[in-house]
Image (tube, grey):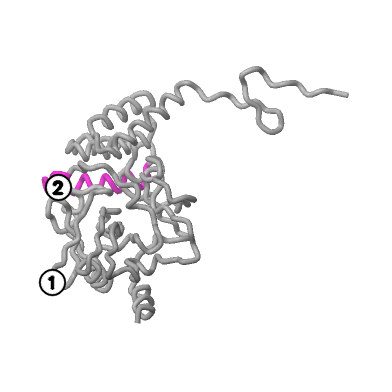
């Protein structure tokens, strides 16, 4: 009877007896640097993020993720020519890289209009991008500001909601008008705000063709105890929260068109890796409040 040969000491084996080479020290070091760079971006420590991503691309010049992160960091630091060069390098390696193409357009708009990006100075709030049974929504922005104005802001930039002539306007923290929520959705939130509810908001996408904002209810007044902020997202049969974002959203500064919605099994704070990329699934679109959803909820309340 033939006995199988044991694997070499220190080398893991996979099914079928084939050995799997151990992860190289260089790969582990690169991964550690990438994780540190992501944390720095989440904490809005852009000089530190620039230093870490620069080390990554120096060690691995064809690392498109590192170069996309570096380009985003340069935008935050106002170093637009360097950002332009970083995204150009990504496109040299991957000519159809959607993240680099989108950010290249953003940089071009800023340079053309001699605009200055509005840097993200606050820590990213991962909880804002988790769907929580009617308490969160990712909403369309209508009548958006011109492209060169939107280009000033990165995904994750905090916003303020202000009532303006019967509509709910979205303003950046510097006071710039970004756009408006759709009228019926806006009127509902205006009523909830007037009666004591409180919300936090941040930009999800500054794409001029499809700008969006994430809004999360952080306080519900006693008067609104039986009302749902985002009825289109209320799923009583579900107990899980669902992530709108995943690993590369804030790393790169925009949504990856080929991303998928990632499930989160527990209502816990997601990791830095999970909150950094918006998911746009072709199978299950991002939840966006619609007027039909609002009509259904209004009828239920009556």
Q: Say which residue appears at 34% left-offset and 47% top-offset.
A: 126
In the figure, 90 relative to 126: above or below? above
Q: Secondary structure at mark 2?
A: helix
Q: Quadrant of residue 34?
A: top left
- Along the viewing direction, whichever of 98 and 70 lies nearer the viewer: 70
Query: Is 277 placed left or right of 149 in the picture?
Result: right
Q: Main secondary structure of the magenta part?
A: helix
Q: Say which residue appears at 24% left-offset and 60% top-offset.
A: 198
Query: Is 270 placed left or right of 198 in the picture?
Result: right
**Mark 1 crowdedness (10 Å alpha carbons): few <14, some 14-19, many ≥20:** few
In the figure, 219 relative to 127: above or below? below
- How many angstroms separate mark 2 from mark 1 (CA)? 33 Å
What residue sits right under mark 1 in the picture? 165
Q: Say which residue appears at 27% left-offset and 45% top-offset.
A: 103
Q: Indicate which disc residue 43 carries.
A: none
Span shown in magenta: 95-118
Q: Quadrant of residue 87?
A: top left
Is residue 115 highlighted in magenta? yes
User: In which quadrant is the N terminus drawn?
Assistant: top right
Q: Secondary structure at mark 1?
A: loop
Residue 268 placement (x, y as % from top left): 42, 47
Residue 88 placement (x, y as % from top left): 29, 38
- Along the viewing direction, whichever of 100 and 203 lies nearer the viewer: 203
| Of callouts 2 and 1, the N-terminal one | 2
Q: Indicate which disc residue 112 carries.
A: 2
- Mark in the foreground, 2 or 1: 1
- Along the viewing direction, whichever of 90 and 118 lies nearer the viewer: 118
């Amino acid at each position: 009877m033939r006995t199988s040969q044991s694997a070499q000491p220190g080398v893991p084996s996979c099914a079928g007896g084939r050995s799997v080479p151990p992860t190289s020290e260089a790969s582990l070091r690169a991964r550690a640097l990438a994780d540190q760079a992501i944390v720095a971006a989440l904490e809005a420590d852009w000089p530190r993020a620039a230093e870490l991503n620069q080390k990554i691309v120096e060690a691995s010049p064809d690392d498109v993720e590192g170069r996309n992160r570096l380009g985003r960091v340069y935008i935050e630091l106002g170093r637009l020519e360097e950002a332009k060069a970083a995204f150009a390098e990504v496109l040299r390696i991957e000519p159809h890289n959607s993240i680099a193409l989108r950010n290249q357009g953003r940089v071009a708009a800023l340079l053309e209009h001699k605009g200055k990006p509005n840097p993200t100075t606050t820590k990213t709030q991962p909880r804002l991008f988790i769907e929580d049974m009617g308490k969160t929504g990712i909403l369309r922005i209508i009548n958006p500001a011109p492209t060169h104005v939107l280009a000033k802001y990165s995904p994750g930039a905090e916003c303020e909601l202000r009532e303006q002539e019967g509509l709910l306007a979205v303003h950046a923290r510097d006071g710039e008008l970004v756009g408006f929520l759709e009228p019926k959705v806006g009127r509902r939130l205006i009523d909830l705000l007037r009666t004591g509810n409180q919300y936090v908001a941040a930009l999800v996408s500054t794409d001029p063709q499809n700008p969006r904002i994430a809004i999360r209810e952080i306080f519900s007044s006693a008067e609104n105890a039986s009302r749902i902020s985002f009825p289109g997202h209320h799923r009583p049969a579900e107990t899980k929260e669902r992530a709108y974002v995943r690993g590369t959203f804030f790393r790169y500064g925009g949504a990856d068109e080929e991303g998928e919605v990632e499930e989160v099994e527990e209502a816990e704070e997601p990791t830095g890796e999970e909150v950094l990329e918006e998911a746009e699934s072709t199978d299950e679109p991002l939840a966006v409040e619609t007027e039909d959803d609002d009509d259904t909820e209004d009828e239920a309340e009556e």
